[in-house]
Amino acid sequence: MSGPEPHLIEAFLEMMSAERGAAQNTIDAYRRDLSDYAAFLGSRGSRPSAADKTLITAYLDRLHAEGLAASSSARRLSAVRQFHKFLCADALRGDDPTRIIASPKTRRDLPEVLSIEEVDRMLAQAELEAGAIADSGKGQGTLRLYVLLELAYATGMRVSELVGLKRSAVTRDASFLHIVGKGGRERIVPLNDRARDAVRAYLETLLPGPFLFPADGADGHLARQVFARDLKGLAARCGISAARVSPHVLRHAFASHLLAGGADLRVVQTLLGHADISTTQIYTHVLDEKLRVLVETHHPLSEQQG
């Protein structure tokens, strides 16, 4: 690894993996960010165990000068913060120079959300195609796409959670899913009647194996890219722009439609598997709109009351 004191970075990454259960792609992202940070310190004749607030601020200034988005700079700073907290916790240095550094201001864009009608159209088309293929006795992939779509919209799962589902995640009567999410956090998510029936029928077609969506690749289960590709194809057949549709957009639709229907934000947080309510609060634009309509409709001075 390039940059000064690589052993400290490796020790931090080992801690993230062993103690916090960080996924490999998370570890790789931390390694890239911290290697860049350490290389910058090296160019200034310093190292992580000696860096001060001025140097870290200079690092952020360099990222800004290079045109890095505020959200990406904030992610880099988050990695640097956690690294320095680790150094302090392990008594590798006595102070945390990131403690009083403000994060770059980011603007959280509202997620793309499909309408209920658009999701219904996709579900109907997927079900129709799965039924037609089933009658011919061919096309397991078409049935798989229908089940994936039902589960994605019924549960709001992350795409990595969905494609990697084990058979054992499905309860005996297929009324619930046991999901293992980020950091090994577990949650139980109920299935609606449509999703439950789709999973039951799909299970009857599967050969023995550990995964609900098996594939021949190294992981043993369907690749997220394959699901994304098939989903975009389905959207196009429904007259919906493929650019607007992805597995993550279905997760947004699940959350937004629940909130629009009156669900509590804390419940949605639990179902999505968010560790922090602040992550779920990106969906409060849905609640804001509901409140605006409520006031305009029912306030005694509202024009609509006239």
Image (spheres, rainbow, N blue to C red):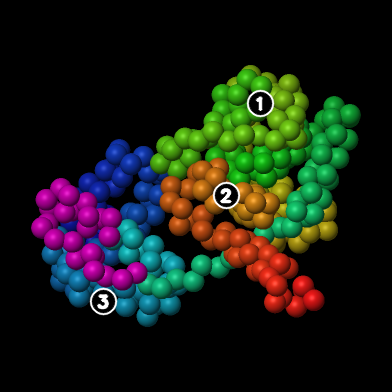
Q: Looking at the image, which residue is at 18% across and 53% down?
A: 87
Q: What residue type is labelled 3?
A: Ala
Q: Which mark is residue 287?
A: none
Q: Distance between the residues labelled 1 and 2?
A: 25 Å
Helix, strand or loop for disc 1: loop
Q: Looking at the image, which residue is at 43% across and 77% down?
A: 67
The location of residue 132, given as percent across then percent down, is 88, 35
The location of residue 191, given as percent across then percent down, is 66, 34
Q: Is residue 16 left or right of residue 94?
A: right
Q: How crowded is mark 2: few (under 14 residues within 10 Å), some or many (20 or more)?
A: few
**Toward the viewer: 44 or 232?**
232
Please state the extent of the stretch shown in magenta in the rendering.
Answer: 81-103
Q: What residue type is labelled 2?
A: Asp
Q: From where the camera sits, is residue 221 visible?
A: no
Q: What residue type is labelled 1?
A: Ala
Q: Which mark is residue 174?
A: 1
- In the rendered view, would you say 162 is above or below 41? above
Contact between labelled residues 3 and 1, with CB atoms less than 8 Å apart? no
Q: Looking at the image, which residue is at 55% across and 68% down?
A: 109
Q: Answer with mark 1 or mark 3, whichever residue precedes in sequence.
A: 3
Contact between labelled residues 2 and 1, with CB atoms less than 8 Å apart? no
Helix, strand or loop for disc 3: helix
Q: How far apart are marks 1 and 3 (CA)?
A: 54 Å
- The residue to which callout 3 is attached is 58
The location of residue 172, given as percent across then percent down, is 63, 20
Q: Looking at the image, which residue is at 71% across and 67% down?
A: 298
- The residue to which callout 2 is attached is 264
- In the rendered view, would you say 210 is above or below 32? above
Q: Residues within 10 Å of mark 1 (few under 14, many from 20)?
A: some
- Whether residue 153 is in magenta: the answer is no
